[in-house]
Image (tube, grey):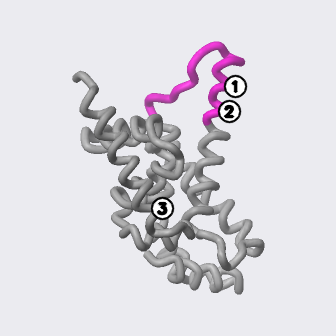
C-alpha cells in the first residue's frame, strides 16, 4: 500500500466520490484494528472503535492536507478514540466501584488471536511509540521498510534503526520471561 495510492482515494473523497471507500477501508483497516486492539483488548470494542475511527476520519477529510500521512492519521485517531474509551471505562469503574463488563457479548477469541493480543500488549509496554508503529506496520501489515518510510514521512535509515532497536528490546524481554 503506497502513500500515493491512499492519497488518490482522499482526492476522490474530497470531491464527494466515496465509490472506492470499501477498497480504501480494506487496505487500511488491519493496521488500525490492531492498534485499537492493543489498547482495549476486546475484539468487539475494537470493531466498534474501528468504525468510529473511519467516521471521524471522513468527517475531517476536507481539512486533510495533501502531505499528511493517511495511515498515520488513522492510527492517531484510533489511538485517541481508544484512550477516550479506556478513560470512560475507568471513570465508570470509579463511579460504580465495580468493573463493568458484559461477558455475554464478547466474541470468543482463538488461541492464535489471544497470542497476538498478548504479544501486542507486551510490545506496546516495552517499545517507544514510533518503534511499536514500525513493528506493527512491518510484521502485521507486511509493509516493506521503504513503504513504512514513505507512509510515515521518515528517512529509511530511521525506520531501519527503529525496527532493529525494537527487535532487540523485544528479544531481550521475551527471552527473559519465565513461562
Q: CA distance from mark 1 to mark 3?
A: 39 Å
The nearer-to-camera label among 3 and 2 is 3
- Is residue 89 in the magenta section? yes
> In the rendered view, would you say 44 is above or below 78?
above
> In the rendered view, would you say 87 is above or below 11?
above
- Can residue 109 be seen at all in this image of the molecule? no
User: What range of the chain is rendered magenta?
Assistant: 86-105
Mark 1 touching mark 2, by CB under 8 A? Answer: yes
Quadrant for the N terminus in the image:
bottom left
Where is residue 98? Give x, y as percent.
Answer: 60, 15
Give the structural element (helix, strand or loop) at label 2: helix
Give the structural element (helix, strand or loop) at label 3: helix
Q: Nearer the viewer, residue 105 or 161?
A: 161
> In the rendered view, would you say 177 is above or below 115?
above
Mark 1 highlights which residue? 91
Q: CA distance from mark 3 to mark 2?
A: 36 Å
Seen from this angle, which residue lies furthest top?
Answer: 97
Mark 1 touching mark 3, by CB under 8 A? Answer: no
Query: Which quadrant of the structure image shows residue 99?
Result: top right
> In the rendered view, would you say 77 is above or below 111?
below
* First of labels 3, 2 by sequence position: 2
- Is residue 16 in the magenta section? no
Q: CA distance from mark 1 to mark 2?
A: 5 Å
* First of labels 1, 3 by sequence position: 1
Q: Residues within 10 Å of mark 3 (few under 14, many from 20)?
A: few
- From the viewer's perspective, is 112 left or right of 124? left
Mark 3 highlights which residue? 158
The nearer-to-camera label among 1 and 3 is 3
Mark 2 highlights which residue? 88
Amino acid at each position: 500500500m503506497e502513500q500515493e495510492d491512499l492519497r488518490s482515494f482522499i482526492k476522490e473523497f474530497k470531491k464527494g466520490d466515496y465509490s472506492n471507500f470499501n477498497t480504501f477501508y480494506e487496505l487500511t483497516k488491519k493496521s488500525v484494528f490492531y492498534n485499537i486492539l492493543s489498547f482495549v483488548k476486546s475484539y468487539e470494542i475494537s470493531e466498534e472503535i474501528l468504525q468510529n475511527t473511519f467516521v471521524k476520519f471522513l468527517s475531517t477529510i476536507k481539512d486533510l492536507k495533501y502531505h499528511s500521512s493517511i495511515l498515520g492519521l488513522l492510527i492517531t485517531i484510533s489511538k485517541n478514540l481508544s484512550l477516550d474509551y479506556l478513560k470512560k471505562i475507568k471513570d465508570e469503574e470509579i463511579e460504580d466501584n465495580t468493573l463493568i463488563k458484559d461477558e455475554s457479548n464478547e466474541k470468543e477469541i482463538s488461541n492464535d488471536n489471544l497470542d497476538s493480543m498478548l504479544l501486542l500488549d507486551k510490545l506496546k509496554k516495552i517499545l517507544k511509540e514510533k518503534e511499536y508503529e514500525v513493528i506493527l506496520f512491518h510484521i502485521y501489515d507486511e509493509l516493506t521498510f521503504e513503504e513504512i518510510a514513505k507512509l510515515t514521512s521518515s528517512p529509511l535509515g530511521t525506520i531501519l534503526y527503529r525496527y532493529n532497536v525494537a527487535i532487540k528490546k523485544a528479544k531481550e524481554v521475551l527471552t527473559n520471561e519465565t513461562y
